[in-house]
Structures are given as C-alpha cells and as structure tokens.
Image (cartoon, rainbow, N blue to C red):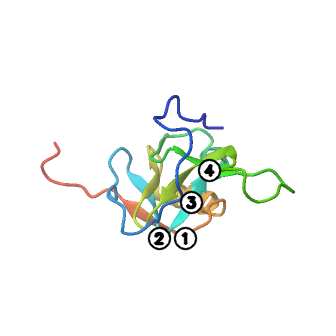
Amino acid sequence: MLQPPKNTKFNKMRKGRSKGNARNSAVVFGDFGMQSAGRSRLDARQIEAARRAMTRYLKRDGKYYTRVFPDRPISKKPLEVRQGKGKGAVDHYAFNVKPGTIIFEVSGVSEDAAKEAFRLAAAKLPFKVNFIKREVSYDES
C-alpha cells in the first residue's frame, strides 16, 4: 500500500473541481503506457490493486513505473454523526485523474504482454483506459 505524503502544508483540502486535460500525456520512462480516458478520483488502494494485477501477470519481468501518487487528503465524518461540528478527519488519500493522464508505464516486455497486463490492471480502475506506445524520435541515439 502507498504511504501518505510525508508532510503537507495543510492537513485537509477542499474538494475542488476537476476540469481540463492532463499535462503529462506522453510515455516518458517505459515503452508502453496506460493512459486514462476518463475523469475520476484514484484511491491509493485502487493504485495498489492495479499494480498487483499487472505485476502478477508479468511475473516480475521487465520494469514498471507508477506515474501517479495519492497526495490529496479526503476527509470523511464517522457513520451516524449529526451534521455540523466542523469538517471530518482525513480518511484516505487520492489522486485526481484527468483525461490523458499516464497511470502506469512498462518496459522490457513484449507489446502483447503489456496489453494484457494493462487490461487486467484496468479492471481495477474506475475509468476507461487507452494503451499507448512510446513515440520514438530520431534525436534519441
């Protein structure tokens, strides 16, 4: 399980609105990437479940990269508590996903293996994903 952030300026955060597209929409570290096609809030447990599904299929072949980190505190009031009396305590941490965000990257495996691993991992995520390849530029030698 991913650990919460080590230190933050403020303990709690407002909900905010998720609009626009992602800025990190290119595969940088690996050969293949899992790109979000939807918009959602990604929990630390969901990231870990997807990572486990992916690594179990790949049987520790190749190398994988996680491009998201849950750093937004999500607060929640306890069950059966009356309204008012302030904001609830921090329950868990999440990451706001925008369309085009790269979630995972994989290198050192075949394209078919990467597609199947991403398919299994995508079943654990609350949005649709796209499979993308790294664009090879001729400047890299």
Q: Residue 57 — which label?
A: none
Residue sitting nearer the eye, 44 or 55: 44
Residue at image coords 64%, 59% = 120
Tell me the element at label 3.
strand
User: Mark 2 vs mark 4: which is more N-terminal?
Assistant: 2
Residue wearing tag 1: 128
| Above or below, comparing residue 80 to residue 8 in the picture | below
Numbered label attached to residue 37: 2
| Horizontal and vertical percent position of residue 44 | 62, 46
Q: Viewer-proximal residue, 134 or 72?
A: 72
How crowded is the residue under tag 1: few (<14 C-alpha within 10 Å), some, or many (20+)? some
Element marked by disc 4: strand
Q: Are marks 4 and 3 in contact (CB under 8 Å)?
A: yes
**Residue type pointed to by label 2:** Ala
Q: Earlier in the sequence, mark 1 or mark 4?
A: 4
Q: Quadrant of the N terminus?
A: top right
**Label 3, residues with CA under 10 Å away: few <14, some 14-19, many ≥20:** some
- The CA span between labels 2 and 4 is 23 Å
Q: Are marks 2 and 4 in contact (CB under 8 Å)?
A: no
User: In the structure shown, which secondary structural element does the residue marked by tag 2 occupy?
Assistant: loop
Q: Are marks 1 and 3 in contact (CB under 8 Å)?
A: no
Residue 13 visible in rendering: yes
Residue at the location (61% across, 57% down)? 121
According to the image, label 3 marks what residue? 41
Q: List the residue tagged with mark 4.
A: 74
Residue 70 visible in the picture: no
